[in-house]
Image (cartoon, rainbow, N blue to C red):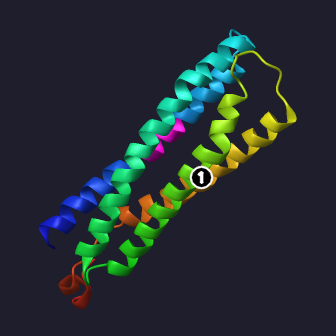
Amino acid sequence: MNKTFSISLTLLRVLLAAWIGAAVLYVITSVAEQTASVFDSVVRDQLATVRFPLYYQFGFVVHFAVAFLSVFTWLSAKSIASRRFLVVMLLVFASFAMFMLDYHFVYTPLQNSIIPPGQARTQTFMKLHIWSRRANETHLTAAFIATLLAAFPVRTPVERAHGAN
């Protein structure tokens, strides 16, 4: 295996796993804050306006880096596992596209609907909230599948020819 492939694959694996872990932790803490009886609606809205921009900023940086690394991994994979890493790259790009579409068309209007904090939830808010949840589930599923595919060990052509495990 060449060095470019090994380095880009290692970084790709780490960042994909980091994004999945960070996103899941973010959801767990967000749900806990939103359902905690100690916070009123004003505080919940304020927490959301502080946390969500950070989620999307971090997600953008990680997705951008992962997209870059997935291209390098695929291009340097050559005959080792190029089809698998083409699929990984396509899943990463699909996840990134869904993430960006969610940000622009769902999150931004959703965020604007809770400023100023403490407003009543409108039908538009409820609809956007459902769309946001589905968009995040979809983009995280694509990223998770990419993570699994990238995590499988890569066998060299010599190992495949000799049937090595």
| Res 27 → quadrant | top right
- Give the residue furthest to the bottom: 161
Question: Is 22 contained in the magenta span?
Answer: yes
Q: Chief secondary structure of the magenta span?
A: helix
Residue 114 appears left or right of 1: right
The image quadrant where one finds the C terminus is: bottom left
Please indicate, yes or no, whether residue 153 appears anywhere in the rendered image: no
Crowdedness of circle 1 by 10 Å Cα count: few (<14), some, many (20+)?
some
Q: Is residue 104 above or below residue 12?
A: above
What residue is disc 1 on?
Answer: 101
Please indicate, yes or no, whether residue 157 appears anywhere in the rendered image: yes
Q: Is residue 158 above or below residue 55?
A: below
Residue 15 or 106: which is nearer the viewer? Answer: 106
The amino acid type of the residue labelled 1 equals Leu
Residue 73 appears left or right of 113: left
The range drawn in magenta is 19-25
The image quadrant where one finds the N terminus is: bottom left
Residue 79 or 45: which is nearer the viewer? Answer: 45
Residue 73 appears left or right of 125: left
Q: How many callouts does the rendering have? A: 1
Q: Residue at x 13, y 66 (%)?
A: 3
Q: Residue at x 14, y 72 (%)?
A: 2
Q: Position of residue 71 (x, y in %)?
A: 32, 67
Q: Position of residue 149 (x, y in %)?
A: 42, 66
Residue 26 appears left or right of 147: right
Q: Residue at x 27, y 74 (%)?
A: 75
Secondary structure beneath disc 1? Answer: helix
